[in-house]
Every structure is written in structure tokens, then in C-alpha cells.
Amino acid sequence: MNTKLTREQHLELYYFMQLNRQLEDRLVKLFRQNKIVGGVYSSLGQEAVSIGTSYALEKRDWLAPMIRNIGTLLVKGFKPRDIFTQHMAKYTSPTHGKDGTSHFGDLKVRHVVSPISMLGDLIPVMAGVAMAGRYLGQNIVAMTWIGDGGSSTGAFHEGLNLAATQKAPFVLVIENNQWAYSTPVSLQVPIRNLADRAAAYGITSRIVDGNDVVAVYEASKAAVDECRAGRGPVLIEVKTMRMKGHAQHDPAEYVPKEMFEYWKTQDPIARYEAYLTKHALWDPKKKSEIDVRIERELDEDQKFAEESPMPAPETAEQGVYCEGCHTIAADWRRPKSEVMPPASSVEAVWKVTDFGAFARPAARAASVVAGVSSVQPARTEPAEVEVEKQQPLRVPFGRGPKDRSVELERREKLVEKPVRHKPHKRRRR
């Protein structure tokens, strides 16, 4: 597989990363001017993650960004004006002012699924997109992102298990930016590498320096190629740092200053600029040309956004429900007969290797060395189990006469101390 970049691609990576940073810097200023409707969630210091991963996809592939993945939208073809107008809730925005931040997509052309606020829920959704694309013969790869905190949600594990079981062409990127809002990773999970969770589902995983855009791209491109070849899914953990608070209202005072100082030395754009210079991929003139282009595009699109109108009141009820506004039809890229009986008929009988029997590690290893394809179950002796005396059941706030624990204790006392009945005395007549 070829993961090497051309000179033009190297320069394009810089363009997208710098465009990402300068765009968000302007959003912060607009937020402080009270021109943003909603919040701004900065990806300062994480630009290499969004750009490097999404750049590995092809136009036919699908992605679903999260709030810090504005860079992926730029790579997929959205313009800065789409981002500006969306955050400013203008009528010219992709959602016509009905939603904010990065909550928009494009299912027809750019193959972008809108973000879901419930963290982790994009994982089963994109696993389904990957499976549907394979069913329709589209040969696509689906990709989404999740933070270190979101990797502890039930949807994360359910979705990843589904993708692994179905061998879906799906790439999941864990953005380990050290903080789930104000909780450090070390207080959230008992492992250092979140990629280790992939082993539980029998899938491939990679750990990469999230502030090295070339390393991120190469790892992502290799993962995309593996998925397209039918060897997916793949989990990628990118280690990076969130250089701002959770959102603009959060000063991130819970982060040690020394931690910020360290990660400033790992700035992804500064590192990539040094990389481009070291490998003679540009000169000061070329850098200036790209920077001037970015400034010009942002000036034009910000002006467009600020001059755009707010949505008219009468448009509030429009687009709430789909009433024949568009046709929903599958994009078949293979003959339907391939997935219809009799071509798709499979006998409902499955073989379970070794019948699911227990095998000791030593026996399993010996069979592998001997070249035995199946492991014979090792004979084991019954384990000696220490049986603890069952404690009587109790309720936390006292017991009533019908409580089960009262009845059990009463029976135990009867067994231990049989009740002796006194002989009846005859009455004298």
C-alpha cells in the first residue's frame, strides 16, 4: 500500500491545517463580539488529527465529524463561509439558521453525516453506513471520531463490537486529548493506551503521535486501505492535547500550567512547518503565498457571513418534516441478484471450532507449535471452591415480620435448638 505524499499533497496538508486554525481564531473573535449563536469548541493543537485522518479518505468515502473536527469539513469540500454562517445561525448557512456549530452534513455529494450530540452514538451509525456501503457494492470506507471520555460510553463498545463482528470497513479515531471536559484520562480509565480496547474485539489498532500530521495521515491511509481490502475495522488512537477549555466559557484552570507549556512545544503546525523546510518542500515565498491565500479566503467568507440575513420568522416551520422534498433511494453499485436468493442463500448451519471447549494455555500453545489446526480440550480436575457461609438477607432500614431474612433466621434457630413441648396436664374433674 502506498502512503507516500507528493509535494503538492504536503503543501495541501499545511493549507488545510492553517486554514483550520485561522478560521477558528476568527470564530473566537466573533464569539466575543456576541455574533455567534451557541458555543465555539476549539481544536487548537489538534488540527493534525482532523486533517491527517480525513485526508486519507477518498471522495466516495463517508465521515461523521464531532465538534472539534471542523478541519474534516474543510477537507471534504465545505468552505469557510459554511462554517461562519452556521455558527452565526444565518439563513445562508447549510441548515438555514436552524442549527449551530458543526451540526450539518451533506449526504448526497460530500458524504458527510451530521454530528450527534450524544457522544459515542456516531460509532454504531457509521458502522451501519460502512455495512450498507458494502452491501450496495460501493466499496467505501466510513470514518468517525470519539474523544477519550466518549470511549467509555456504552455506544462506543456496542458500535465497535458490531463493526468488529461484521468486519465492517470502518475506521474509528480516538482523539486522546488528555481531558474529558475537566477529568484527566488517568482518572477515567485504568489503562494508559485506549487503543488496547481493540484487542477485546479482535480488531487491529494503532497508536500515533497526534501532533505529527504526516504520521497521522500514514496511519490513517494504511487503515483505510486495510478496510477497503476487507480487513477492517481499525481503531486508531491519536495522542494529542486540547489547548483550550471544553468551550469558550471554560478557562481550563484545572489543567496544570506545566502541561500546557509542554504541549506548546509540540504544536502541530510549527512542527510541520519545520518538516517542510527540512525536506525542502517549500521556501519562504511558497509559505507566504499559501498564507496570503488563506487570509483572502477568510476575509471574503467572513464578510459574506456577517452581511447575510438571519432566517425570516415564517421559515421556522419549514423543513421540520420531510414531505416529499427529496427521494430516498439506494445507490446500487452491484447487481441486486447477488444479494437475493438463490445467490445469497446460505444454509443456516454454523460450525463452532472445538465446540467452544476450554483449553489450557499450554495445550493451546503446543497445538500451534505442532501445526494442529484445532485444539483438543484439556482434561481438567474440578476446582476446589471455598464455600462461604451464606449470610442472612437483610434490608438496609430495619425489617418487618414478613421480611425473608426474619423467616430464614427463625428456621435456623429451629434447626439448631429444637423446641421442647411441655406435657399437657390433665384436668381434674
Image (cartoon, rainbow, N blue to C red):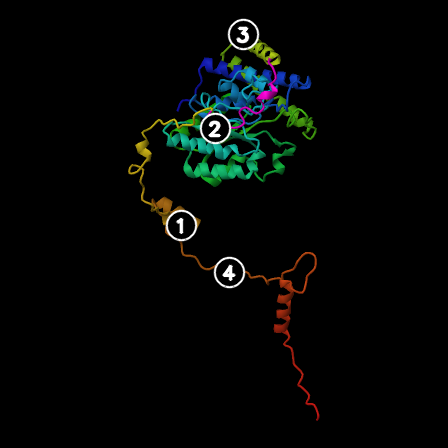
Tell whether position 279 is magenta.
Answer: no
Q: CA distance from mark 2 to mark 1?
A: 34 Å
Residue 392, image x and y in percent? Answer: 63, 62
Please give the name of the residue rendered at 53% of the width and 37% of the height, measured from the top-left corner.
155
Query: Can you tell which of label 2 and label 1 is closer to the viewer?
Result: 2
Query: Can you tell which of label 4 and label 2 is closer to the viewer?
Result: 2
Q: Residues within 10 Å of mark 2 (few under 14, many from 20)?
A: many
Res. 384 mark: 4
- Tell me the quarter of the image containing the N terminus: top left
Q: Secondary structure at mark 1?
A: helix
Ranked by sequence position, the earlier of labels 2 and 1 is 2
Q: Which residues are magenta?
A: 308-324
Q: Residues within 10 Å of mark 3 (few under 14, many from 20)?
A: few
Q: Are marks 3 and 4 in contact (CB under 8 Å)?
A: no
Q: Residue furthest front?
A: 314
Q: CA distance from mark 1 to mark 4?
A: 23 Å
Specify the amino acid type for callout 3: Glu
Residue to which mark 3 is pinned: 289
Q: Are marks 1 and 4 in contact (CB under 8 Å)?
A: no
Please give the name of the residue rendered at 45% of the width and 28% of the height, measured from the top-left corner.
142
Query: Can you tell which of label 1 and label 4 is closer to the viewer?
Result: 1
Residue to which mark 1 is pinned: 356
Q: Are marks 4 and 2 in contact (CB under 8 Å)?
A: no
Specify the amino acid type for callout 2: Met
Q: Residue furthest bottom?
A: 429
Q: CA distance from mark 4 to mark 2?
A: 49 Å
